[in-house]
Image (cartoon, helix red, strand yellow):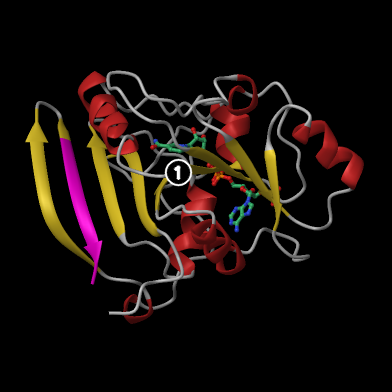
Amino acid sequence: MKESNKPYVILSAAMTIDGKIATKKGDSELSDKADWKEVHKLRTQVDAIMVGKGTILKDNPKLHIKYYNHRGYYRLVLDSNLTIPLDSNVISFQQEIYPTIICTTENVPLDKIKKYEDKGVKIINVGDDKRVSLIKLLPILKNLGINTILLEGGGNLNWSFIENNLINEIRLTIAPWIVGGKEATSLVEGIGFEKIVSAPRFELFDVKVRTYYITLRYKRK
Ligand SMILES: NC(=O)c1ccc[n+]([C@@H]2O[C@H](COP(=O)([O-])OP(=O)(O)OC[C@H]3O[C@@H](n4cnc5c(N)ncnc54)[C@H](OP(=O)(O)O)[C@@H]3O)[C@@H](O)[C@H]2O)c1
């Protein structure tokens, strides 16, 4: 079988019973310790973790591993105009173990890029579209030796992957809350599909039930 020119992408998220990954104020503390441990284990098995700019701005995650020994991986941030703060945790925290790559566009001036490179960040310019094009980006990442990506949101980036049919696998934890709210971020944002037949279909291959939480795993049909 011909090897794919794109990395294998696993979408990972914790969502409420009503499909939200954060409240309207951006509170996303949905996982308990057992769930985090499983997510961190999954992180040990991939070459990179990817998030969108919105997740950096709202959560300022370190995207590191607790609980397990590991060799490290890339942290990938999609930020079309290079705007995340220079003191974000993905830039200031342990780049020697988790090198950070910011994927941006050719619209960003060179002097701005230099400020990030001076902090040890690698910048990949992905064409001159308004937004980073995933179709152009994924083969570039594969060429860097990134064969598996754990996509950790948020909702808008998840939609771009779904829209372009780029998700191979999903690990989804359903946490025992209902938060409601039109402004609360859903697992997948974007404009959505008009018809079920146009939407990608996934096959359920694992279900884990423990007190209050359910974890579902799907593969692309
Ligand atoms: N519960 C969970 O598991 C979980 C996990 C992750 C995040 N979250 C929550 O999700 C929320 C953030 O989600 P979000 O939807 O606001 O932000 P997001 O998906 O993290 O980031 C979206 C931003 O990424 C940039 N981007 C660059 N290229 C893109 C592309 N091709 N497609 C889509 N976006 C692209 C865009 O900004 P530019 O146009 O400026 O580049 C866009 O506004 C936070 O509240 C966070 O707590 C929850």
- Say how many tags the image has: 1
- Residue 58 falls left or right of residue 66: right
Q: In this view, does 170 lie above or below 201?
A: above
Residue 219 magenta: yes
The x and y percentages for residue 107 are 84, 56
* Residue 19 belongs to the span the image colors magenta: no
Q: Where is residue 50 in the image (x, y as percent from the top left)?
A: 49, 44
Within 8 Å: ligand 1 and the Cβ of disc 1? no
- Please identify the quarter of the rendering in which residue 130 is found: bottom right
Most common secondary structure along the magenta stretch: strand
Residue under pointer 1? 48
| Apparent side of residue 165 relative to residue 139 in the rendered image (left or right) | left
Residue at x-position 51% and y-position 24%: 62
Measuring from the top left, give residue 19's x and y in whole percent.
34, 46
Q: Residues within 10 Å of mark 1 (few under 14, many from 20)?
A: many
The span picked out in magenta is: 214-221
- Residue appearing at x 34%, y 19% in the figure: 66
User: Is residue 78 found left or right of 105 in the rendered image?
Assistant: left
SS state under label 1: strand
